[in-house]
Image (cartoon, helix red, strand yellow):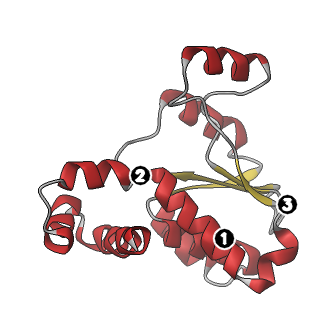
């Protein structure tokens, strides 16, 4: 399954920091750039939500862990509609509305091959005093952060890696 292989490779990339080389080795394809484009934040986010769905301990929290749509990759008409209905640019990808350890909730931004936008930085600044905020580069990393946040087990240690 392509998603499984992408996840496996992306987890290796976190360690090696040489994404293109890892993909060439594992996929041995002339379409490496196409695979890299498909191996996006969206796939990592799908993997995160797959892990959440498969964990029976999180079943009763499914309304508290959700993604927030953003304005990218939409037609101009859709962008206008979403803007008029309250969609804001810069909102981070995943929200967890469960207060823990002095935080009102958790925001996770998934990044694959980019950096935070200026509006995302503004969003973070507006919420950093009340929410735990992290940038994750793989679905598994985001999932591990969620588990640490919910249990506080190794949370401080984990935060050093994602901040």
Q: Name the residue under label 1.
A: 146
Measured along the vertical axis of the image, is residue 118 above or below residue 79?
below
Report crowding for label 1: few under 14, some 14 to 19, many 20 or more residues within 10 A (C-alpha): many
Q: Is mark 3 on a helix, strand or loop?
A: loop
Measured along the vertical axis of the image, is residue 80 above or below residue 27?
above
Q: In which quarter of the image is residue 48?
A: bottom right
Q: Mark 2 points at which residue?
A: 40
Q: Closest to the observer: 94 or 4?
A: 4
Q: Closest to the observer: 137 or 132?
A: 137
On screen, residue 94 versus residue 43, left or right, reads: right
**Residue 63: image tag:** 3
Q: Residue at x 80, y 69 (%)?
A: 101
Distance (Cα) linking label 1 and label 3: 14 Å
Distance (Cα) linking label 2 and label 3: 25 Å
Measured along the vertical axis of the image, is residue 123 above or below residue 107?
above
> Can residue 130 be seen here?
yes
Q: Which residue is drawn at 11% across and 56% down?
A: 30
> Can residue 163 be seen here?
no
Horizontal and vertical percent for residue 127? Answer: 71, 42
Q: Which residue is drawn at 56% across and 61% down?
A: 46
Which of the two labelled residues, at mark 2 and mark 3, occupies the earlier sequence position? 2
Report crowding for label 2: few under 14, some 14 to 19, many 20 or more residues within 10 A (C-alpha): some
Distance (Cα) linking label 2 and label 1: 20 Å
Q: What element carries label 2?
A: loop
Which of the two labelled residues, at mark 2 and mark 1, occupies the earlier sequence position? 2
Horizontal and vertical percent for residue 49? Answer: 64, 66
Q: Closest to the observer: 46 or 127?
A: 46
Quadrant where the N terminus sits is: bottom left
Horizontal and vertical percent for residue 108? Answer: 61, 55
**Residue 43: image tag:** none
């Amino acid at each position: 399954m392509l998603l499984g292989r992408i996840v496996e490779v992306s987890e290796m990339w976190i360690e090696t920091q040489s994404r293109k080389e890892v993909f060439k080795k594992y996929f041995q394809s002339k379409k490496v750039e196409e695979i890299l484009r498909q191996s996006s934040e969206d796939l990592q986010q799908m993997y995160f939500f797959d892990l959440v769905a498969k964990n029976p301990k999180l079943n009763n929290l499914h309304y508290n862990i959700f993604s927030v749509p953003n304005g990218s990759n939409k037609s101009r008409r859709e962008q206008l509609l979403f803007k008029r209905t309250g969609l804001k640019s810069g909102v981070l990808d995943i929200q967890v509305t469960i207060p823990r350890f002095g935080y009102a909730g958790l925001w996770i931004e998934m990044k694959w091959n980019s950096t935070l936008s200026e509006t995302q930085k503004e969003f973070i600044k507006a919420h950093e005093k009340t929410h735990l905020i992290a940038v994750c580069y793989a679905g598994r990393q985001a999932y591990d952060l969620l588990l640490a946040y919910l249990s506080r087990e190794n949370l401080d240690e984990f935060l050093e890696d994602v901040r």
